[in-house]
Amino acid sequence: GNSVTQMEGPVTLSEEAFLTINCTYTATGYPSLFWYVQYPGEGLQLLLKATKADDKGSNKGFEATYRKETTSFHLEKGSVQVSDSAVYFCALKGGGATNKLIFGTGTLLAVQP
Amino acid sequence: DAGVTQSPTHLIKTRGQQVTLRCSPKSGHDTVSWYQQALGQGPQFIFQYYEEEERQRGNFPDRFSGHQFPNYSSELNVNALLLGDSALYLCASSFSGNQPQHFGDGTRLSIL
């Protein structure tokens, strides 16, 4: 079945450091891929998405490229801020009419000033 | 424009009780999905409602049931609560089946 694997956290970085959070997936067909962010005590917010191979999703300085050949969708940001501290979830949606999301286990990012 | 709203924010129940959680979708959205997020884990899909019907269901027992109303709002019901049902329950809404889902802030359910 479909699944998502994320790198385990926590990831601790200093402000302005480069961020990479790895995400790989297993899916049949052509899934859509997402990154969601969850701040403490809140629900999930959509950060970015990509719907087909080689698409690059980007938002708020974050970006991720849908790589079908490596079944990956790694999240990157060139210079993190303290306000980026949160849990990041990689997710996929398989094809078809329903849009059930399958999530990874999440990666906690802690950015220190 | 209000986003997805869920109530209550927190709830404490004891084993064997029943609980009802509520969700109002984002304006213009007609599809509601429910997820269970255990502590330290990613959300797990419970089921999805569209046009007042359950359209897809995840791997959850029949103790978990739901309903969608004509105004697209939804309820999640859990019967015979177990300690393992303690989690954050998230509601997400979207327009039809192919648009990104928007999440509420969730209901934190604690079972004693």
Image (tube, grey):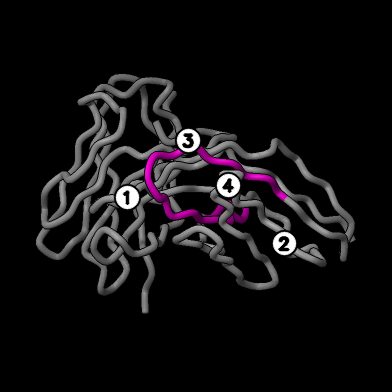
Whole-angstrom CA distance, mark 1 to mark 2, is 31 Å
Q: Which residues are magenta?
A: A21-42
Picture quadrant of residue B26: bottom left
Element under disc 1? loop
- Residues marked 2 and 3, same chain: yes
Q: Are marks 2 and 3 in contact (CB under 8 Å)?
A: no
User: Which amino acid is tagged 1?
Assistant: Gly
Residue assigned mark 3: A3
Element under disc 2? helix
Residue assigned mark 1: A95
User: Which mark's residue is nearer the viewer, 4 or 3?
Assistant: 4
Q: Are marks 1 and 2 in contact (CB under 8 Å)?
A: no
| Mark number displayed over residue A79 | none
Task: Provide residue A8's location: percent of width, then percent of height.
Answer: 70, 36
Seen from the viewer's position, the closer of residues A51 and A86 is: A51
User: Which mark's residue is nearer the viewer, 1 or 2?
Assistant: 1
| Mark number displayed over residue A84 | 2
User: Which amino acid is tagged 4?
Assistant: Glu
Element under disc 3? strand
Task: Provide residue A108's location: percent of width, then percent of height.
Answer: 69, 45
Whole-angstrom CA distance, mark 2 to mark 3, is 26 Å
**Of callouts 1 and 4, the N-terminal one:** 4
Picture quadrant of residue B17: top left
Label 4 marks which chain's residue?
Answer: A
- Residues marked 1 and 2, same chain: yes
User: Which amino acid is tagged 3?
Assistant: Ser
Whole-angstrom CA distance, mark 4 to mark 2, is 29 Å
**Of callouts 4 and 2, the N-terminal one:** 4
User: Which amino acid is tagged 2?
Assistant: Asp
Using the image, determine if residue B31 lies above or below residue B46. below
